[in-house]
Image: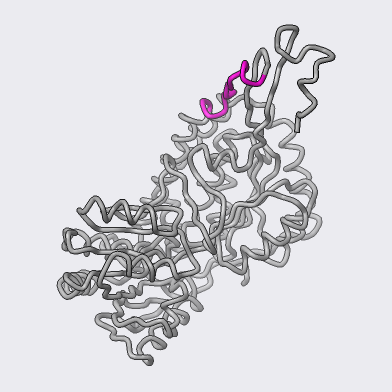
């Protein structure tokens, strides 16, 4: 893919960028390593101050950067402003909580025969972030805020269709007062990622993207013995039981599936509805999907904009055609919108069966697949048969059903009577082929830190010279 801004609402190429030369890339790597040598010695309070400054600068830029996101990947103006505002909150959350998270964690010194025992978390160094286009600011910020708070240095290899968003982030951190080269954007193609990841100055990597991309990065990093965190997509189940408030569930289901024009890893994609309420829920769901306004993403009233790429809209067409050809029913939607750009109608498909591609693959667009089930156990069983395990939803007022759902669903996150979302206050990540590791909270920050054990002894510590206390140290 060329490094370029292509407006998904028109298909027009607005700006292209040359990838970094070998010499320019080497310069950036060298500057990142040099920056870390000094940045790791800054205090958590200093880093928090820079994060607050980044929050303030971004808050002032919300309208401008929102329009940039709309232009580059087609999300609606309202969702772009919400994304930028979420990034502001993320910066401020780490600025507020980060210094406390980085304080030494005292342990029971007497239990380990020490005068004092504690754990300190120290940054690893230069971390490579390989990010997707669907949330061009938030995906990068939810890496950058904890990484920079920790004292790490960031290199961002963003998706090739959002280069101006990537460059904006580098500019933002520079304007916020972070030391030079603490966060740099790399305008490089996918073929150059291996070189960067294998470089001895790069200590770890995080990727949000496809399964094949995750396999490639994990293999390279494993060969080089470098830490990785991977978030590789999902096909989240949304289970509706008889005790659910159906109108609310259908309203949230419509948003959960169609947020970001249907292009979200944690979007609800497979809807499992108990037979007792299936007819009513399907009616409500179809009505709400059909009422969504598709149009120019720059217009305030638009709820669904275009898909981000031409290949993306072709993929969605193929999934729906495959399901229809194999006996599924398209209740609403089911075709491209007749206008310039890469628009696809919000769609509901029922009668999905295992031989259909959308049963076992992730549909990255505004298409909901609905199943009718006879029990919670059946819903969980079908949900767990999928290779992904990112988020999950249950709609039920039954406490026993809620407990069984939390116990049995194979996912990194379980939301009950609400839409799956990411918050700085909660760990974010999945299991199975949705990846490994976590982002956000202190858990995400510690992923790229060394948890260093510190043991301090003395004459009264219990490990006196000549004792046998250390004989079984390992």
In the depicted structure, whether residue 275 falls above or below residue 119: below
The answer, for residue 436, to whether it is visible in the render is yes
Between 130 and 115, the one lying in front of the other is 115
Image quadrant in which the N terminus is located: bottom right
Between 29 and 109, the one lying in front of the other is 109
Q: For the point 66% across and 49% down, which residue is it?
A: 155
Residue 176: x and y, percent?
55, 35
Q: For the point 53% across and 61% down, which residue is it?
A: 432
Residue 3: x and y, percent?
62, 66
Between 429 and 166, the one lying in front of the other is 429
Q: Is residue 136 left or right of residue 340?
A: right
Between 68 and 117, the one lying in front of the other is 117
Image quadrant in which the C terminus is located: top right
Q: Which corner quadrant of the image does residue 458 belong to?
A: top right
Does the magenta segment cover residue 106? Answer: yes
Question: What colouring method underlies this structural image?
Answer: one colour
Q: For the point 46% across and 70% down, which residue is it?
A: 386
Q: Is residue 10 left or right of residue 372?
A: right
The residue most toward the right is 466
The residue most toward the top is 459
Q: Is residue 226 left or right of residue 426?
A: right
The answer, for residue 60, to whether it is visible in the render is no
Residue 34: x and y, percent?
76, 38
In the depicted structure, whether residue 434 falls above or below residue 340: above
Q: Which corner quadrant of the image does residue 175 belong to?
A: top right
Q: For the point 15% across and 72% down, which residue is it?
A: 280
Does the magenta segment cover residue 312? Answer: no
In the depicted structure, whether residue 61 falls above or below residue 392: above
Q: Is residue 133 left or right of residue 343?
A: right
Give, as a single range, the part of the protein colored magenta: 99-112
């Amino acid at each position: 893919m060329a490094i370029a801004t292509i407006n998904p609402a028109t298909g027009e190429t607005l700006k292209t960028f040359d990838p970094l030369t070998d010499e320019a890339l080497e310069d950036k790597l060298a500057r990142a390593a040099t920056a870390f040598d000094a940045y790791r010695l800054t205090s958590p309070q200093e880093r928090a101050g820079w994060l607050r400054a980044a929050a303030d600068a971004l808050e002032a830029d919300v309208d401008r950067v929102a329009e940039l996101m709309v232009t580059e990947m087609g999300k609606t103006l309202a969702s772009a402003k919400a994304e930028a505002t979420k990034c502001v909150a993320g910066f401020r959350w780490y600025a507020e909580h980060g210094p406390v998270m980085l304080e030494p964690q005292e342990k029971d010194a007497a239990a380990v025969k020490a005068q004092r025992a504690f754990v300190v978390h120290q940054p690893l160094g230069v971390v490579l972030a390989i990010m997707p286009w669907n949330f061009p600011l938030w995906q990068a910020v939810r890496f950058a805020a904890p990484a920079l708070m920790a004292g790490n240095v960031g290199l961002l290899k963003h998706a090739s269709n959002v280069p101006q968003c990537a460059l904006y982030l580098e500019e933002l951190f520079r304007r916020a007062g972070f030391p030079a080269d603490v966060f740099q954007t790399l305008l490089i193609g996918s073929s150059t990622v291996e070189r960067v990841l294998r470089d001895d100055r790069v200590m770890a990597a995080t990727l949000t993207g496809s399964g094949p991309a995750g396999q490639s990065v994990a293999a390279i990093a494993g060969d080089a013995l470098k830490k990785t965190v991977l978030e590789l997509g999902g096909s989240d189940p949304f289970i509706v039981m008889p005790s659910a408030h159906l109108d609310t569930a259908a309203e949230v289901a419509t948003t959960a599936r169609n947020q970001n024009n249907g292009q979200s890893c944690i979007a609800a994609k497979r809807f499992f509805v108990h037979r007792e309420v299936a007819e009513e829920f399907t009616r409500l769901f179809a009505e709400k999907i059909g009422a969504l306004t598709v149009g120019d993403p720059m217009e305030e009233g638009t709820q669904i904009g275009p898909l981000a790429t031409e290949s993306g809209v072709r993929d969605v067409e193929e999934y729906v055609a495959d399901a229809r050809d194999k006996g599924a029913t398209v209740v609403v939607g089911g075709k491209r919108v007749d206008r310039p750009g890469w628009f696809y109608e919000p769609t509901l498909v029922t009668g999905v069966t295992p031989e259909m591609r959308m049963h076992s693959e992730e549909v990255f667009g505004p298409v909901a697949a609905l199943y009718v089930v006879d029990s919670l156990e059946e819903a969980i069983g079908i949900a767990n048969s999928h290779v992904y395990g990112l988020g999950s939803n249950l709609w039920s007022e039954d406490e026993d059903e809620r407990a069984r759902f939390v116990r049995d669903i194979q996912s990194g996150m379980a939301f009950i009577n609400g839409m799956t979302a990411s918050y700085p206050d909660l760990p974010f990540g999945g299991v199975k082929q949705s990846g490994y590791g976590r982002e956000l909270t202190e858990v995400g920050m510690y992923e790229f830190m060394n948890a260093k054990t510190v043991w301090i002894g003395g004459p009264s510590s219990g490990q006196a010279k000549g004792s046998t206390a250390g004989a079984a140290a390992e």
